[in-house]
Image: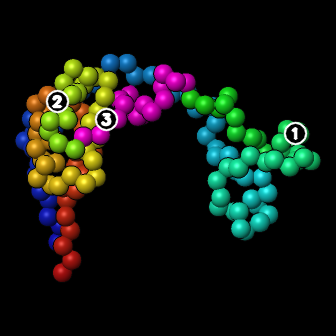
Amino acid sequence: RVIYLVCASESASSVDKMVKPLVKHNIVKKRKKKFIRHQSDQFMRIARSSWRRPKGIDSRVRRRFKGQIKMANIGYGTNKKYRHVLPNGFLKFRVSNVKELEVLLMHNRKYAAEIAHNVSLKKRKEIVLRAAQLNIKVTNAKAKLTTQENE
């Protein structure tokens, strides 16, 4: 059986949809593939490891020979203006209570509130309701509002 808990009125959810970012940029990714560690396909012990820079004196990858795997470097970095921007155009701001939500009153077109993971259901409802009144977008407004009972 699934029980749904209602957190705010219908008008609150419609106001939430109206909040749009001040400027929405097209985020340009210079590379979508992850950088894999050199020889990670040959050895199981490093198969799932993250990127490490090759440091060997004869390393083909470090010397950037043609046909070798690409090395991570600063040129692949994101533009500083668009760093940490969510796909919806907002920046995240973690909120734990209603008082912290008031900080976003003048910045509701740039930042979106994200309710912290350890906030209780009761406080979550209060935060979502107050955010709707202040016209602030909450990225995880529906989190933890559905509960399942196994019978």
SS category of the residue bearing label 3: strand
124 part of magenta stretch = no
Give the image location of residue 12, x and y in percent: 12, 36
Query: Which residue is located at x 14 percent, y 64 percent?
Result: 3
Numbered circle sitting on residue 63: 1
92 part of magenta stretch = yes
* Label 2, residues with CA under 10 Å away: few <14, some 14-19, many ≥20: some
Q: Earlier in the sequence, mark 1 or mark 3?
A: 1
Numbered circle sitting on residue 5: none
Query: Which residue is located at x 20 percent, y 68 percent?
Result: 148
Taking depth in this image into account, of 53 and 22 the one nearest to the observer is 53
Q: CA distance from mark 1 to mark 3?
A: 42 Å
| Left or right of 88, for residue 147 | left
Q: Earlier in the sequence, mark 2 or mark 3?
A: 3
* Residue type highlighted by circle 3: Phe
Q: Do the residues under discs 2 and 3 have CB atoms within 8 angstroms?
A: no
Q: Do the residues under discs 1 and 3 have CB atoms within 8 angstroms?
A: no
Q: Is residue 124 above or below residue 103?
A: below
SS category of the residue bearing label 2: helix
Query: Which residue is located at x 14 percent, y 59 percent?
Result: 4
Reading the image, the residue beneath label 3 is 93
Residue 12 at least partly seen? no
Residue 138 at least partly seen? yes
* Residue type highlighted by circle 2: Glu
Numbered circle sitting on residue 102: 2
Q: Which of the image's four quarters has the N terminus?
A: bottom left
The residues colored magenta run: 79-95
* Label 1, residues with CA under 10 Å away: few <14, some 14-19, many ≥20: some
SS category of the residue bearing label 1: loop
* Residue type highlighted by circle 1: Arg
